[in-house]
Structure formats: structure tokens, C-alpha cells
Image (tube, rainbow, N blue to C red):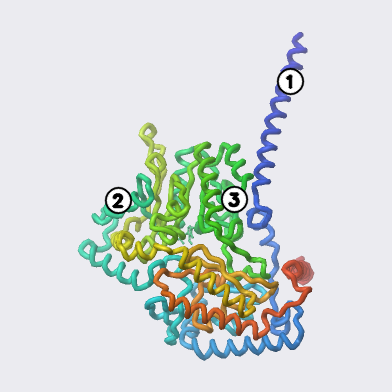
Amino acid sequence: MEWGSATLAFYGVGAAALATSLVALRRRLQLSKAKHPSLTGHSRMARRVASFVPFYEYGEAEFFHTDDAPEEVAARRRAGFMRLAALYRQRFVQTIGRTAEVTETISDLQFTDAYRVPFQYSRFVREHLKTGAFVQSSAGVLVTDLDGNSFYDLTGSYGVNLFGYDFYKETIGAGFERVRELGPVLGPYHPVIAENVKRLREISGLDEVSFHMSGTEAVMQAVRLARYHTRRTHLVRFCGAYHGWWGDVQPGIGNPVPAHETYTLKDMSEDSLRVLRTRRNIACVLVNPLQALHPNAGAPSDSSLLDSARTAHFDKDTYSAWLKRLRAVCTEQNIPLIFDEVFVGFRLAPGGAQEYFGVRADLVTYGKTLGGGLPIGVVCGRKDLMKRFREDRPADICFARGTFNSHPYVMAAMREFLRFLEMPQAQALYRDLDRIWDERARLLNQRLREAALPVEVANMSSIWTVSYRQPSRYNWMLQFYLRAEGLALSWIGTGRLIFSLNYTDADFAAVADRFVAASRAMQQDGWWWSDPALTNKSIKRRVLKEMIARRFASRDDHPNS
Ligand SMILES: Cc1ncc(COP(=O)(O)O)c(C=O)c1O
């Protein structure tokens, strides 16, 4: 009898263990299904693959026909490239000279310089088409380098420049005046902070506000608070989304250690919602609404422009519907939803992405332009999520401080920025905003198509990206032709063009003329030579072959292998 009950108990425990492992297995499978099939969706795998990519490069002999273009085309490319190189040397002499003096001692510069184009082409490009890192002045929509060359600014200063540089000069100036008497006293507040908090609460529709020095810090704090209050560990981010450079939100390439408590899920996918419904360890969901322009893809940098597979398309209705579904699941599962509006906040609508997409978040991070031109990160959130201590557990706190948080000068510039948002001029700028920028994009695309150029732009309001309609290994060359035409791009090149809202139709027409002229020159120089055998697939396959060959060659070459 005793033996019988022991056996029964044994089977009972076995059955329970089996059921538990089946549930765990099911969850594991659900998680796998919710990952985007690309490497961007598999952070750990991406890191592993990245560590295998060997360095190799194209010397002058191969540089101009890595796509097997005929000699005549390669010669045209070489002539075009050398013409550009001569123009850069002559036109940007001071700017390039000053840049060369500091590059070896500024690590940031060495990085951006190396990753402006795919690494195989990088050294040759750097030798000939040096890009200056200095500008002397800004006015209207122009920036001017040390040689006196003016460029239409399409960098948008990483998104900070929303209303035009002159606006921020005034904002900073007026802000400085307002707090001059106090100066840079830190710790105690200048009264201006109360006005900011009031406006930010109105704008965000949330209860409390905390101030930080960068968008990255604001995101760190929002996630930390969510973990603290839910007592859960994992943050969910969507494939490709950028949330600053903190390790937990950058689990893939770029971060030397893996982020164990981050799930990277497919954007706009039912599979991801299923994971949110079934996992009990999810502390928050982070959304960067910019991903609506290129869901599941990373920041479209020209350094990864190996072929023409980069695409983008913004569909506001579809993305709004997705956010609403996501909101509903987060509410149902009691998971705080964080909108990371560091980039898009105030750019899409005065009330940010919440207003624009018609969805409310539990925590919102802002940054960039909100500082009125000075460094900033802000978290707005529900009262219960913002609290940093527990009344009943005095030692259980959620610590967050920062020497420069709430700096009087930043607070005062922010006040000027927020004050402007309330003015009729600002409201006029937001009126018809999307229609204006969509129409500008449409006109440029029409011109590019009429000129039979294989380039097109896609946009989410004033944030634009360039894609290429025909397979090519040289699309990244366009950034150099654009610069030669007086258009300033950030180091990620044609992947991200950011316009400030003070662009007039005439300014934009000038940009469009230059864009078309640059593309035409690039085409005439043969970079977009096409051949039926040259497909995005064949390009990828070829690059992969080169990497494998180099990988094994370098093993054989290595004395210790
Ligand atoms: C959506 C988003 N979150 C966070 C950050 C990080 O902000 P910061 O560069 O100020 O640290 C950025 C910066 O580009 C961003 O676009």
C-alpha cells in the first residue's frame, strides 16, 4: 500500500514536472516566434556573427568595380571620384586641415569617420574624400564651414533642431538672461522649474516629472522605475529601435556585454503581444515611435548600405492601430508602457507622439529639442510609477540623481522653448505639418523619377530617409555628391535627413534642386550601372563569400593559428 502511494506520488510529481516543462517550452517557443528573423531581431546571434566578420578592404584596383562593372564604367567612376576628391581638397581646405589636426585625439571622430561608408571602402574614401568636422556658424537653414562654404542643414543636429538654429540661439540667450542672477547653482532650484513642470504635465497628461541630462539617462530612469514598481526584471524593446546607448537597450552589436534582461521582439506583430500576455517577468515595454518609418530595422546608416535592400514606408493609421493594440495588452497585463519620445516628441505634434498617434503611455521620455538647444532628458509619468521610495519599506528605494539635473540654464532655455510652443507662430508651424512635408517628399520623388534616377525618399513628417530602387554596391557614394552640392548630412549619411520646420518652400526647392543634381552627377559617373546579374541577393552572397574567404585566409595567415 505504501509502495503504491509512493509510486503514485512519484508519477504525480513527474506529471507536474512535465506539465511545467511543457509550459516553459511553449513560452520559449512563443518567444522565439516573436523574434524578427533578421539578425537585428537576434541580438546575441548578431554579436556572435559580428565577432566573426574579418577586416578586409578594397584597394584602388578593386574599388571601382566590386560589382564587376565593365572597365569603361569603372573608369568613369574613377574619374568622378577623383574629380570630387579634387573639389573637396580645394573647397574644404581649412575645414579638413583643422579636422586632421584633431582626429587622432578625438575618439568619437575616429569612429564616425571610419563608419561613414561600408568598412571595405572606408580607408580609400577617407584618404580621398575627407569630411570636415567643423562648422563656424549657422543662420536660417544654413551652416557654414571654416572655408566659408554654406550648406543646407539636413542633419537637424540629431533631431534637436526643430525650429531652426536662430530660434535656439535666442532661446538660450533669453534663458541665460532669466537665470543670470542665480548662475550655475546646482541642488536648489530656480523658480523657472515650476513653470516647466506645469507645462510638461499638461503636455504629457502625466502626473510627475524628473529631469536628466540626456535622452539615454531618461530612458534608463524610466526603465528602472518600471522595474522597481513592478518588481519584474525584463524590458521589452522592439527590433531595430534606438533608445540611447545604455547597455540594456542596446543588447546587440555595439555593446561589449550581453543584456540578459532585455527581450527584443518583432514590431507590429501578434506574436509579440502573445509574449506580453504570457510572460510574468516583463517590467515594461519601450516604444520608439520613429520605428513606424522602418519597423524592425535599425538606424539606416550608410555604413550598412551594402546593397539597395534598405526600405522605408510610413503608414500612420496602421502604426496607430498597432500602438492601440499594444496599449490594450499592456493595460490588461499591468505592464507599464513607455513612449520614448526623445526623438519624435514635439516634432510630430505639440503634444508629441501620444497626441499624434492618439495613444496614452504610462511613462514618456523626452529630450533633444526640449532643452531649447541645451542637453536634456526628461521623464514624465504616472504618480505611482514615478515614486522613488516605499512608505512602508524605507530602505527599499529606487535611486536616481545626477549632478547637472535641473541645471538652471537648461531649465531656463526649456522654459523659452515651451513658451514658444504656446504661441500662434508655433501653432501655425504645426498646422498642416504632415501635408507640407509629405507634399515636399512627393515632389522630390516625382522629380527623381522623371529624371530616371534610382533614388527615392520616404518620410515621417520632417524625418526623411533615402532608399535606392536599383541594386547597387555604391549607394553610399551619394552622400559625397550631396555634400559637393552644398547639402550637409550627419555621419550616418543618406539614411537620415532631418529638416527643421523653418524650411520655406524656397529653401526646400533649393535642396530638391541640389538633391537631383547630385543624383544625376552620381548616375553620370556610372555608380548606378546595372546588370541583370546584379541583384541585392547576388551582392549579399558575394559579400558573404568575401568575408568567408578572408576569414579562412586570415586564419591561415595568422602565425599562431
Ligand atoms: C528615441 C531615442 N531615445 C534615446 C536617445 C538617446 O538620447 P541622447 O543621445 O540624448 O542620450 C535617442 C537619441 O538619438 C533617441 O533617438
Q: Quadrant of residue 166?
A: bottom left
Question: What separation in Å lies between label 3 and label 2 (alpha carbons)?
Answer: 34 Å
Q: Position of residue 109 (x, y in %)?
A: 51, 73
Q: Position of residue 180 (x, y in %)?
A: 23, 65
Crowdedness of circle 1 by 10 Å Cα count: few (<14), some, many (20+)?
few
Q: Identify residue type, mark 3.
A: Met
| The one of 327 and 227 positioned closer to us in this rendering | 327
Residue bearing mark 1: 10
The quarter in which the C terminus is drawn is: bottom right
Q: Residue at x 36, y 66 (%)?
A: 373
Tell me which label, 2 or 1, sits earlier in the chain: 1
Residue bearing mark 3: 268
Question: What separation in Å lies between label 2 and label 1 (alpha carbons)?
Answer: 63 Å
Q: Identify residue type, mark 2.
A: Lys
Tell which residue pokes out farthest to the top in this image: 1
Residue bearing mark 2: 198
Tell which residue pokes out farthest to the left in this image: 181
Q: Against 518, is 12 above or below?
A: above
Q: Are marks 2 and 1 in contact (CB under 8 Å)?
A: no
Q: Residue at x 61, y 80 (%)?
A: 451
